Image: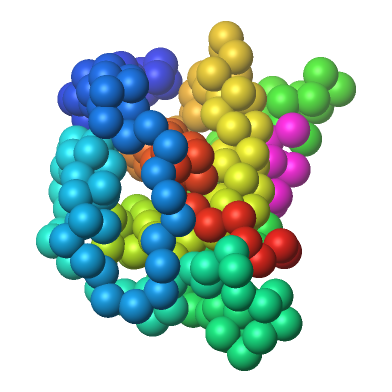
Amino acid sequence: MDTSIKPRTSRTLFAVCALLLILVCLHDNVGSMPLPARGPVRASDSNRRTPYKNIYRSLVDPFELYSNRPSVRAPVLAPRTTDNPSSAVTRNYVHMLRTNPAYISPSAGDAVDSVLARMRALLDRSHPAPTLAEQRSLLALFDDVARQATWDLQNPLHPNNIGAQHAVPIARLKSKYKEVIELLDAEGRLSKLTNHLNDADSDRFLNAFDLLNTEHTLLEIVGANHAARFPGL
């Protein structure tokens, strides 16, 4: 059986081109945007989201995840910075952040911790070369994170929901993804964690890694340009 890691699919090549588009769009169009107010989306709000929508679609299209509407719409936008932090409106928003699947939750990165812990254990110099069973166990954890990333891409990070997100949960999840990406980008590590997997399982692992890379990119954009920083969490 050929155990070498296969080259990335065309989705990855497409994503590289999309990242170039991101740099152009961010430089020319996105800039620093005001936080959205509560209430119905106005035409001006829609115009501000247009650069993000173009970037978003270019990144999720290769995974066939694009939809005009999220399956769950965020019921509450971020409060205004002039609102009382202890008001009912603000408390309701924080409750929605923690419980409603249309938001990136403050606990969103918890599932990634299991992946990071398993990867570090398998990559530790004192650990023998990972067995097929250990690689499959890691793949199962990756599958769980990939399913959540798929949901995030189609719902909280959908252009219609980005005005409802909060910067703190986004930063936490982005930081966890960055750790995963840096671990796997180091030379030889990806092969060490997947070299016993069959072709189908290797593709699943790479697809999950691509999904995490894609969500990491969108989290960075939303956190910098669209997510609220009020109230404090």
Q: Give the residue at x 27% y 63%.
A: 160
Q: State the residue in front, 69 or 151.
A: 69
Name the colouring of the figure. Answer: rainbow
List x then y, in percent, for residue 25.
26, 27
When the figure is inspected, residue 209 is found, relative to residue 191, above or below; the finding is: below
List x then y, in percent, for residue 71.
26, 73
The answer to whether any part of residue 209 appears in the image is no
Q: Give the residue at x 17% y 61%.
A: 43
For the view shown, which residue lies furthest in the front direction? 82
Answer with left or right where residue 57 lies relative to residue 121: left
- In magenta segment, residue 113: yes
For the view shown, which residue lies furthest in the top direction? 187
- In magenta segment, residue 61: no
When the figure is inspected, residue 49 is found, relative to residue 86, above or below; the finding is: above
List x then y, in percent, for residue 230.
62, 62
Q: Which residues are magenta?
A: 111-120
Q: Quadrant of the C terminus?
A: bottom right
When the figure is inspected, residue 128 is found, relative to residue 79, above or below; the finding is: above
Q: Give the residue at x 70% y 75%.
A: 85
In the rendered image, which quarter is residue 63 located in?
A: top left
Please identify the dominant SS of the magenta region. helix
The answer to whether any part of residue 120 appears in the image is yes
Q: State the residue in front, 124 or 179.
A: 179
List x then y, in percent, for residue 124.
79, 25
